[in-house]
Amino acid sequence: MYKIGNDIVLISRIEKSIKSPSFLNKVFTENERLYCKKAENFAGLFAAKEAYFKALGTGIKLPLSDIEICHNDNGKPYFKGIDNCDLSISHDGDYAIATVIMW
C-alpha cells in the first residue's frame, strides 16, 4: 500500500523563524543548515519533514531534526537512511511544497 504526504509552506513564515537559533536547531540538522543558503531552501526542507509525518499518518513523534534530508549528485532530495519513500520538493513564488510517497 502506498502512503502519500503533502505540505505547503509560506516561505516568509520560515524566513522569520530561521532568525531564531532554537528553531534552526530544533528543526534542521547541522548538514541541512550548512546546505541551505536561502529561506526558500529551509522552507522546502521544513515542508518535506511535515509531509513525511503526514505520509506516516502518526503525527510528529520525534524531533524534526532527527530526520535528515540530503541531495544526490543531481540535486534530488532524499531522506537519509529511509529507503521506502520518495521525496519531491518544489518552490514557486511565495511557497515551498513537498510530497512524500511511501511504500
Image (cartoon, helix red, strand yellow):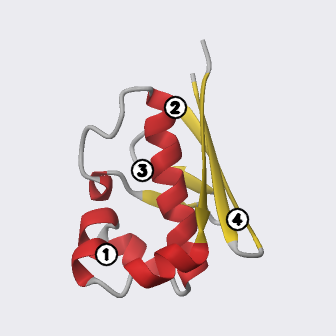
- Say what secondary structure mark 3 lies in: loop
Q: Earlier in the sequence, mark 3 or mark 1?
A: 1
User: In terms of image quadrants, where is residue 16?
Assistant: bottom left
Looking at the rendered image, the quarter that the N terminus falls into is top right
Q: What residue did someone put label 2 on?
A: 55
Query: Front-most of 98 and 93?
Result: 93
Q: Residue at 55% of width from left, 34% of height from top? A: 85
State the mark number for residue 80.
3
User: In terms of image quadrants, where is residue 71?
Assistant: bottom right
Q: What residue did someone put label 4 on?
A: 74
Q: Can you say whether 45 is above or below 1 in the image?
A: below
Left-right relation of 52 to 27: right
Q: Can you say whether 101 is above or below 35 in the image?
A: above
**Residue 79 in the image: x percent, y percent?**
47, 49
State the mark number for residue 70.
none
Q: What residue did someone put label 1 on?
A: 24
Query: Front-most of 90 and 29?
Result: 90
Q: Are marks 4 and 1 in contact (CB under 8 Å)?
A: no
Q: Residue furthest top?
A: 1
Q: Earlier in the sequence, mark 3 or mark 4?
A: 4
